[in-house]
Image (cartoon, helix red, strand yellow):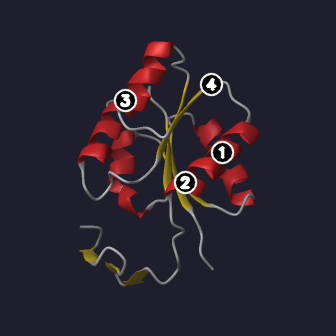
Amino acid sequence: MAKYKILIVDDEESLCEILQFNLEVEGYEADVAYSAEQALEMHPERYSLILLDVMMGEMSGFKMARILKSNPETARVPVIFCTARDTEDDTVAGLNLGADDYIAKPFSIREVLARVRSVLRRTASPQTESEVIGYEGLEMDLRRKSCTVDGN
């Protein structure tokens, strides 16, 4: 069965748990990273969509978005900012960085789910189980025609 894979990147553990639970109830596969650095190590190119906070530890969500959008492997992965930075300037900056949507905290889970559905409807292809094949540290992504050994 085809599934959409969503990466949640936020340093608020309780919010991540709520988002992950609700996304999984809706039928999505959801993973969590508590920092931008951790998210970049999780092969963001393999995700259908990234929910990204702006204000996190060492690297901001804005900086992560710049990295994602400048890399040909990740440039097409949709990004929705979910952040407490709610000024018009912040929203415009996020959208100008290539974000597909911008949601200010606090937000309703129903609204986030509706926006996720909307962005995926316009932009993403579901991931199928057969696209990535793995065995003992070796992974082959058939769609991207790439291979990694122990994550490298």
Relative vertical location of residue 21 with respect to residue 53 in this rendering, above or below = below
Toward which corner of the image does residue 110 lie, by quadrant?
A: top right
| Mark linked to residue 145 | none
In this view, the mark in front (2 or 1) = 2
Name which residue type carries label 3: Asn
Query: Which is nearer the N-term, disc 1 or disc 3?
Result: 1
Name which residue type carries label 2: Arg
Q: Distance between the residues labelled 4 and 3?
A: 19 Å
Residue for badge 1: 19
Relative vertical location of residue 39 with respect to residue 127 in this rendering, above or below = above
Residue 60 visible to the viewer = no
Toward which corner of the image does residue 104 lie, by quadrant?
A: top right
Residue for badge 3: 96
Q: How far apart are marks 2 and 1 (CA)?
A: 21 Å
Residue for badge 4: 105
Relative vertical location of residue 49 with respect to residue 65 in this rendering, above or below = below
Q: Residue 61: percent from the left, percent from the top?
A: 39, 33
Query: Which is nearer the N-term, disc 2 or disc 1?
Result: 1
Q: Is mark 4 on a helix, strand or loop?
A: loop
Residue for badge 2: 122
Give the number of callouts.
4
